[in-house]
Image (tube, rainbow, N blue to C red):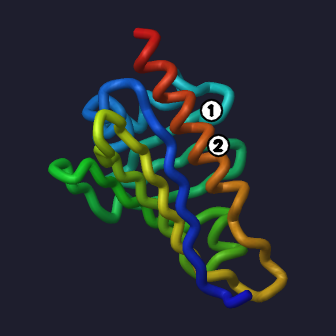
């Protein structure tokens, strides 16, 4: 396999797509209250945030409210030790009567020995399900 790659996950959400998008776009600091088993802390510093047991600093690279899209770009932490580039995008899309949360992870590994970031895609998928469950149950 090459050093660059892209992983994509689609998860149907039952809750309000606007509330879901708002959580990642405007209220990521609420994530520890919604999914404490996954995110323990989020600190906002001029557009970047930290979280999870492993510290990752990201900047919000792009927000498109009309398309319900938020892109995060890692710039510090353990991800940068393994990946030269790491970008995660969450996009909410309508497919008929269903709403889909689509995570796209684009990355470039430091070397061939670094594994593909499947565990981070699984983390994003689990986070999606947990946030959606929180919104549905409110």
| Relative height, residue 8 to residue 54 (above, below) | below
Residue at 57% across / 37% down in the picture? 127
Drawn side of residue 27 relative to residue 118, left or right: left
Residue at 37% across / 60% down in the picture? 71
Q: Could you say whether the residue bearing mark 1 is in a helix, strand or loop?
A: loop
Q: Residues within 10 Å of mark 1 (few under 14, many from 20)?
A: some
Q: Position of residue 115 (x, y in %)?
A: 78, 73
Residue in front for this viewpoint, 92 or 112: 92
Mark sitting on residue 52? 2
Q: Could you say whether the residue bearing mark 2 is in a helix, strand or loop?
A: loop
Q: Are marks 2 and 1 in contact (CB under 8 Å)?
A: yes
Tell me the quadrant of the picture where the C terminus can be found: top left
Q: Position of residue 130 (x, y in %)?
A: 56, 28
Drawn side of residue 68 relative to residue 78, left or right: left
Reading the chain from its start, which is encountered first: label 2 or label 1? 1
Which of the 4 quarters of the picture holds residue 36? Answer: top right
- Mark 1, residue position: 40
Residue at 30% across / 53% down in the picture? 69
Give the farthest residue toward the right: 113
Residue at 41% across / 26% down in the picture? 14
Tell me the quadrant of the picture where the N terminus can be found: bottom right
Q: Position of residue 10 (x, y in %)?
A: 50, 50
Residue in front for this viewpoint, 96 or 54: 96
């Amino acid at each position: 396999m090459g050093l660059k790659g892209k992983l994509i996950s689609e998860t149907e959400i039952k809750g309000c797509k606007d509330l879901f998008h708002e959580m990642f776009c405007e209220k990521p600091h609420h994530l520890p209250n919604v999914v404490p088993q996954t995110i323990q802390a989020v600190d906002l510093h001029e557009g970047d945030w930290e979280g999870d047991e492993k510290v990752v600093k990201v900047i919000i690279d792009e927000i498109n409210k009309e398309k319900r899209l938020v892109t995060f770009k890692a710039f510090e932490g353990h991800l940068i030790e393994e990946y030269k580039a790491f970008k995660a995008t969450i996009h909410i899309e309508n497919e008929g009567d269903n709403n889909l949360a689509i995570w796209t992870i684009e990355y470039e590994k430091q070397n061939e020995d670094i594994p593909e970031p499947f565990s981070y895609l699984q983390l994003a998928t689990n986070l999606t399900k947990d946030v959606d469950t929180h919104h549905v149950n409110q």
